[in-house]
């Protein structure tokens, strides 16, 4: 019996409960969350890491509420599937939600369009009235460091560096006006589709400065790849659409983003390959250089 049989059956049974027919089982992603295309229009996301750091359906319910709010306002997002209640749904011990399938097209998203669509999402998110925790991912990342220890993945000095960065970033960003954000705005969470650039995966939504999302989407281009054309194009697109990016706040967010991504490595990549280890080393080296510059 495959380890995926139970979560696939859970999703199939849930769809059938609401009279939604399924005619295929195409695995689009197999990680902590299993993503399945189950019909021409239906995609299921099933949490398979039931022992992970996020337990229960509360965070799923928050994601669904945010996605519904954005879709109703016509924001550039992938919507929940209209054939089922928004959920989250529980079946056979698995938590899941159901989304509309969108056709991905070839090609990289235009940086200016990435910035413009992010700005549009931020505009709509300002009207979201549900409860969101300020700077939640930074606080959660400190908790992850405490639970994992960190020394094994980063060394004692590296773990201490990450704690300092997260604590200093929390102090600085708590003084900056905030609003609801995507929370994890990287290129893996947007799609170039037949309908244009669409954003997805709102599970990390929290409140904070808009520079957090901007830092998240430009981090790799600006810091790892030295691709200022892409990074600058995103920022310019965001600002031309009416957004404002404070460079000082953006610098704090870039450091905070690097610390957050590093802190989660033991959870997300328990056996990282060489490319992952190289990216982690470069993040820690960059954070050390930032700390020296600010000293």
Image: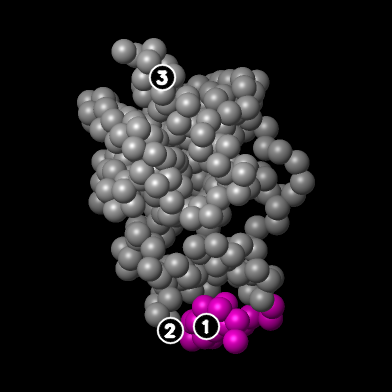
Where residue 275 sits, quadrant-wise, is top right
Q: Mark 1 packing: few (<14 Cα in 10 Å), some, or many (20+)?
A: some
Question: Along the polypeptide, which appears first: circle 3 or circle 2?
Answer: 2
User: Mark 3 falls on what kind of element?
Assistant: helix
Choose mark 3 or mark 1, whichever is in front: 3
Question: Along the polypeptide, which appears first: circle 2 or circle 1?
Answer: 1
Residue 235 visible in the snapshot? yes
Give the side of residue 69 with respect to residue 238, left or right.
Answer: left
Is residue 15 one of those drawn in magenta? yes
Where residue 158 sits, quadrant-wise, is top left
Q: Position of residue 115 (x, y in %)?
A: 55, 31
Q: Position of residue 173 (x, y in %)?
A: 28, 28
User: Mark 2 falls on what kind of element?
Assistant: loop
Give the residue drawn at x 56%, y 24%: 222
Q: Looking at the picture, tell me which residue is in the foreground, 48 or 250.
A: 48
Q: Looking at the picture, tell me which residue is in the foreground, 172 or 112.
A: 172
User: Mark 1 falls on what kind of element?
Assistant: helix
Give the side of residue 256 with respect to residue 99, left or right.
Answer: left
Colour scheme: one colour
Give the CA distance from mark 2 to mark 1.
7 Å
Give the CA distance from mark 3 to mark 2.
47 Å
Is residue 186 one of those drawn in magenta? no
Question: Along the polypeptide, which appears first: circle 3 or circle 1?
Answer: 1
Verify CB contact (< 8 Å) between mark 2 and mark 1: yes
State which region is magenta.
1-24
Q: Which residue is mark 2?
A: 92
Q: Position of residue 42 (x, y in %)?
A: 60, 70
Q: Which residue is mark 3?
A: 290
Choose mark 3 or mark 2, whichever is in front: 3
Residue 181 visible in the snapshot? no
Q: Which residue is mark 1?
A: 6
């Amino acid at each position: 019996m495959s380890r995926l049989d139970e979560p696939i059956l859970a999703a199939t049974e849930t769809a059938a409960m609401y009279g939604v027919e399924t005619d295929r089982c195409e695995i689009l992603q197999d990680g902590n969350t299993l993503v399945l295309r189950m019909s021409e229009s239906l995609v299921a996301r099933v949490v398979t890491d039931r022992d992970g750091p996020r337990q229960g359906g509360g965070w799923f319910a928050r994601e669904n509420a945010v996605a519904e709010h954005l879709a109703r306002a016509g924001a550039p997002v992938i919507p929940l599937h209209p054939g089922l209640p928004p959920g989250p749904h529980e079946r056979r011990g698995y938590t899941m939600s159901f989304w509309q399938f969108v056709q991905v097209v070839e090609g990289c998203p235009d940086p200016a369009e990435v910035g413009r669509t992010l700005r549009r999402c931020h505009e709509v998110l300002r009207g979201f009235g549900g409860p969101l925790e300020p700077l939640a991912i930074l606080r959660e990342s400190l908790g992850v460091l405490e639970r994992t220890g960190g020394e094994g993945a980063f060394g004692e000095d590296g773990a201490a560096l990450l704690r300092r960065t997260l604590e200093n970033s929390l102090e600085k960003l708590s003084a900056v006006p905030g609003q609801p954000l995507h929370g994890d705005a990287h290129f893996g969470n947007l799609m170039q589709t037949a309908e244009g650039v669409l954003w997805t995966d709102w599970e990390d939504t929290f409140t904070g400065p808009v520079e957090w999302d901007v830092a998240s989407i430009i981090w790799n281009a600006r810091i790892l790849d030295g691709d200022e054309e892409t990074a600058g194009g995103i920022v310019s697109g965001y600002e031309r659409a009416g957004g404002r990016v404070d460079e000082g706040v953006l610098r704090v967010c870039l450091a905070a983003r690097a610390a957050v991504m590093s802190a989660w490595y033991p959870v997300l990549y328990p056996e990282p390959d060489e490319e992952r280890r190289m990216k982690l080393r470069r993040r820690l080296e960059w954070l050390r250089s930032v700390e020296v510059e600010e000293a």
